Image (cartoon, rainbow, N blue to C red):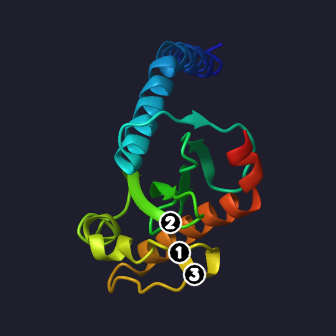
């Protein structure tokens, strides 16, 4: 019995801790979902100004989290991509009615402060993507010295957004 007791006590502690984690998750998951939705909506508003938008349902490929479209045909594609950090780049790529990048808004950035965060902090870097209409065009921008992984992650993220838009344009705009 003396050999079994420590294992039994540890098992009970683990079961109780697991139950508390499940309870905490269930208690907070709705609030977390609401906060994500509010952040997405405020990011769409930052891209296009005060406008209505609707979420487009579907599976649009790897890294594509959500797609919203406005009545004017402007599209916001939320993409999560790896930079230096795994899934460290979470952006909304604004695509105008002509299929060209019109803006980039950061939902979150988990890159190294002072280095990888330059992809957000240097407007000229982001502005290189404006007017691009294909994945190949997005890959042909100048990176930031010292932030190679983050720069490449941004190029990949914008490319994924454009690829998803171009492959699913009718489904996105048609409804």
Up-down relation of residue 6 to residue 39 (above or below):
above
Residue 7 spot, x, y in % from top left: 61, 22
Instruction: Tell me the CA gap for discs 3 and 2.
Output: 11 Å
Up-down relation of residue 79 to residue 18 (above or below):
below
Mark positioned earlier in the residue sequence (3 or 1): 1
Q: Which quadrant of the rendered structure holds the C terminus?
A: top right
Residue 104 spot, x, y in % from top left: 41, 59
Instruction: Tell me the CA gap for discs 3 and 1.
Output: 6 Å
Residue 95 spot, x, y in % from top left: 53, 59
Q: Are marks 3 and 1 in contact (CB under 8 Å)?
A: yes
> Which residue is labeled 3 in the image?
137
Mark positioned earlier in the residue sequence (1 or 2): 2
Up-down relation of residue 146 to residue 20 (above or below):
below
Mark 2 lies on a secondary structure that is: strand
Q: Residue furthest front?
A: 72
Label 3 neighbour load within 10 Å: few <14, some 14-19, many 20+: some
> Which residue is labeled 1 in the image?
132
> Which residue is labeled 2 in the image?
101
């Amino acid at each position: 019995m003396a050999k079994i007791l420590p294992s039994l006590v540890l098992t009970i502690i683990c079961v109780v801790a697991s139950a508390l984690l499940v309870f905490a998750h269930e208690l907070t998951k709705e609030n977390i979902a609401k906060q994500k939705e509010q952040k997405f909506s405020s990011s769409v508003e930052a891209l296009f100004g005060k406008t209505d938008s609707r979420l487009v349902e579907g599976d649009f490929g790897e890294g594509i989290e959500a797609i919203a479209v406005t009545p004017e045909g402007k599209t916001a594609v939320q993409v999560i991509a790896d930079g230096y950090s795994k899934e460290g780049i979470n952006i909304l790529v604004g695509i105008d009615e002509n299929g060209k990048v019109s803006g980039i808004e950061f939902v979150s950035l988990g890159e190294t402060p002072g280095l990888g965060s330059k992809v957000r902090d240097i407007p000229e870097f982001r502005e290189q993507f404006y007017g691009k209409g294909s994945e190949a065009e997005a890959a042909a921008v100048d990176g930031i010295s010292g932030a190679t992984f983050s720069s490449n992650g941004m190029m990949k993220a914008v490319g994924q957004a454009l690829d998803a838009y171009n492959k699913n344009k009718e489904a996105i705009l048609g409804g």
